[in-house]
């Protein structure tokens, strides 16, 4: 980017603000003077009854509202030609604004995601951030900070010269994290990679959204060896991985498997392998401080100075009886006169705790991620992707073998690659959902010249190549044939369904709609397909993942479908008794049946007769038993 000569000769206001910031850094926030803070710095402190501890910034109220505002007029359009193994995969790749996508996924995946990992813009002053559309909230505020630009662009470069440098970033992050929380399961966690530019602010908004009590920890990852950052002489080599739980009481992270070489069973103890352990504890009371006498040697043992036994006298008798405490028949004077066994089967976990310094080795540096992607893609197409083993370990620490993992700043799709790699190693069935804005690659970039028009194109191709490479590398694994290396592609699109109450007739159909029948033009928007409509309806239902099976019921008609063996979507333009009878006879029995209102031609009697026949036929096929089901119309 060219440096332009400033048209301003001198700006006295900005110069004064700069001098004020040098004197009182706390009173200048994002280029604006906090006059209340300035008065306090000058000793003019007033008692304020409504003070509370919180982080606030310009636009916070709108960011909160944006999180709560439903996404209207949007859907996810299935793109089969860009998908891989779509008939069997349970993985998703979704292109679009991640805030819109998160809202669209809220029904299907509410409380279903075990782990979220994101690598958002770090706000270095050169990052692009999402510029969200606040237009729907304009009536409530005349602020225009969230509007799209004149080209409808979602991304802006958030430069340090901006008067609202931190606020812009916080306004982007807050609603996304707020909606993401809804998707987490009760035992779920979110991991966020971040550097020093915004780690403090990130912690504060996460404290507000997830609850300060649900902060799990902050992990350090070494990113590089030497830097010359800020000309301060300080060598910054790391960034942070911040972790929050949905409900911390339900979360237990597990690291690498423990070393059990010391465990053995030389005395054939029926409780299994054991190791000699320390029987004392740091805390206790008088009841936990007593003599233990060896019946063979008469040696008296007391807890070490300042410590207590880890058990009471009553428990001691029980431990002796069941073999957990064994007295030595011979021992030296400086030895304890008994063995206190820790059994392997008593361990809460066979894996070590997660260490906050687990990622300080050189193997987790950015250069390794760059090398991995370069070798896989045969080119330098994406800057500084996260190393595969870093993301793989984070997934290993926080998920079970059938968990769903979400990354809504997907980038080059390292997270998807890591999910497939880990599944290949341990036979897991983890599933991924990647979300990425189709951010254009610069036309002079190596990626663009190689045919990748957007970052999303790079991510999808990485998953394709990585899956095949993994299958070849692990071809000797017994479960490799079942490894899911596919993904269904969806893109954010305008709704397929005319949800408004406008009345259309044949004369009102535009030229662009001329290929549609009159009823299709009445009900649907140009460019729709029946499958698009089915997926849009599926999104409006709770608990049906987008990978649910969709079956075309050709025995009923050319436009009747069933998804998840549960919901029938009948898009036939005319409903006949034969169609109703066949729907009534379906096995498994549907819990909902959806018809088109236009199929009844505004004939109330016809609709009532059809519904009555449906109910009668369902009872007939159920041998007179009632069946709970629901009928809806579009």
Image (cartoon, grey):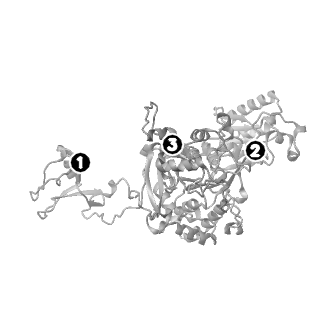
Secondary structure type for disc 2: loop
The x, y position of residue 72, in whole percent, is 69, 40
Visible residue check, residue 426: no
Q: Mark 2 or 1, which is nearer the eye?
A: 1
Mark 3: give few (<14), some (14-19) or many (20+) Cα within 10 Å. some
Q: Nearer the viewer, residue 117 or 303?
A: 117
The x, y position of residue 550, in whole percent, is 69, 49
Q: Which mark is residue 283?
A: 1
Q: Which mark is residue 496?
A: 2
The answer to the question of whether label 1 and label 3 lie on touching residues, with beta carbons closer than 8 A, is: no
Left or right? Give the position of 100 relative to 578.
Answer: left
Q: Which mark is residue 209?
A: 3
Mark 2: give few (<14), some (14-19) or many (20+) Cα within 10 Å. many
Query: Relative to residue 562, is residue 269 depicted above or below?
Result: below
Q: Quadrant of the N terminus?
A: bottom right
The answer to the question of whether label 2 and label 1 lie on touching residues, with beta carbons closer than 8 A, is: no
Left or right? Give the position of 631 relative to 30.
Answer: right
Q: Quadrant of the C terminus?
A: top right
What is the spatial separation of the Cα atoms under label 1 and label 3, in whole angstroms? Answer: 36 Å
What is the spatial separation of the Cα atoms under label 2 and label 1, in whole angstroms? Answer: 66 Å
Q: Residue furthest right?
A: 507
Q: Nearer the viewer, residue 236 or 528?
A: 236
């Amino acid at each position: 980017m060219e440096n332009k000569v400033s048209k301003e000769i001198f700006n006295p206001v900005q110069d004064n603000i700069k001098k004020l910031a040098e004197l009182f850094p706390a009173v200048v926030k994002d280029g604006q003077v906090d006059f209340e803070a300035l008065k306090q710095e000058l000793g003019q402190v007033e008692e304020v009854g409504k003070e509370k501890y919180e982080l606030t910034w310009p636009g916070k109220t709108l960011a909160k509202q944006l999180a709560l505002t439903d996404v209207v007029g949007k859907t996810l359009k299935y793109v089969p030609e860009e998908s891989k193994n779509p008939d069997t995969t349970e993985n998703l790749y979704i292109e679009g604004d991640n805030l819109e996508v998160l809202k669209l996924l809220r029904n299907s995946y509410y409380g279903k995601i075990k782990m979220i990992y994101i690598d958002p813009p770090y706000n270095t002053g050169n990052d692009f951030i999402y510029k969200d559309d606040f237009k729907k909230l304009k009536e409530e505020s005349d602020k225009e900070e969230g509007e799209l630009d004149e080209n409808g662009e979602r991304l802006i470069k958030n430069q340090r010269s901006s008067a609202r440098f931190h606020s812009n970033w916080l306004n982007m992050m807050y609603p996304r994290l707020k909606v993401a929380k809804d998707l987490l399961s009760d035992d779920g966690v979110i991991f966020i990679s971040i550097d020093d530019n915004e780690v403090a602010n990130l912690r504060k908004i996460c404290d507000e959204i997830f609850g300060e009590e649900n902060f799990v920890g902050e992990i350090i990852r070494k990113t590089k060896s030497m830097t010359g950052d800020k000309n301060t002489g300080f060598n910054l080599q790391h960034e942070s991985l911040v972790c929050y739980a949905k409900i911390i009481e339900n979360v237990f992270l597990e690291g690498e498997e423990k070393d059990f070489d010391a465990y053995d069973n030389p005395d054939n103890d029926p409780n299994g392998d054991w190791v000699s352990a320390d029987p004392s504890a740091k805390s206790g009371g008088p009841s936990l401080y007593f003599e233990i006498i060896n019946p063979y040697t008469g040696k008296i043992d007391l807890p070490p100075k300042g410590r207590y036994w880890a058990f009471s006298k009553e428990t001691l008798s029980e431990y002796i009886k069941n073999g957990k405490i064994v007295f030595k028949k011979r021992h030296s004077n400086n030895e304890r006169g008994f063995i206190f066994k820790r059994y392997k089967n008593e361990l809460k976990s066979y894996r070590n705790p997660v260490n906050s310094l687990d990622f300080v080795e050189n193997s987790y540096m950015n250069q390794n991620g760059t090398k991995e992607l370069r070798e896989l893609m045969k080119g330098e197409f994406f800057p500084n992707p996260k190393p595969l083993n870093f993301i793989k370990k984070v997934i290993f620490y926080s998920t079970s073998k059938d968990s769903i993992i979400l990354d809504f700043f997907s980038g080059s799709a390292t997270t998807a690659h890591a999910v497939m790699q880990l599944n290949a190693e341990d036979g897991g069935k983890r599933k991924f959902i990647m979300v990425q804005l189709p951010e254009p690659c610069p036309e002079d970039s190596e990626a663009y010249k190689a045919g990748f028009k957007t970052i999303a194109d790079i991510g999808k191709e990485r998953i394709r190549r990585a899956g095949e490479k993994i299958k070849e590398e692990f071809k000797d694994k017994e479960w490799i044939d079942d490894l899911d290396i596919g993904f269904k592609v969806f893109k954010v699109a305008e709704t397929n369904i005319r949800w408004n109450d406008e009345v259309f007739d044949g004369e009102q159909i535009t030229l662009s709609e001329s290929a549609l029948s009159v009823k299709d033009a009445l009900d649907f928007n140009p460019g729709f397909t029946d499958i698009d409509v089915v997926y849009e309806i599926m999104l409006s239902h709770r608990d049906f993942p987008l990978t649910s099976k969709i079956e075309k019921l050709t025995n009923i008609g050319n436009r009747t479908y069933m998804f998840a063996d549960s919901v029938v979507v009948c898009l036939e333009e005319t409903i006949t008794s034969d169609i109703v009878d066949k729907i009534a006879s379906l096995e498994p029995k549907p819990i909902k049946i959806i018809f088109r209102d236009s199929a009844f031609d505004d004939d109330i009697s016809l609709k009532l007769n059809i519904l009555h026949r449906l109910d009668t036929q369902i009872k007939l096929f159920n041998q007179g038993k009632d069946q709970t089901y629901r009928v809806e119309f579009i």
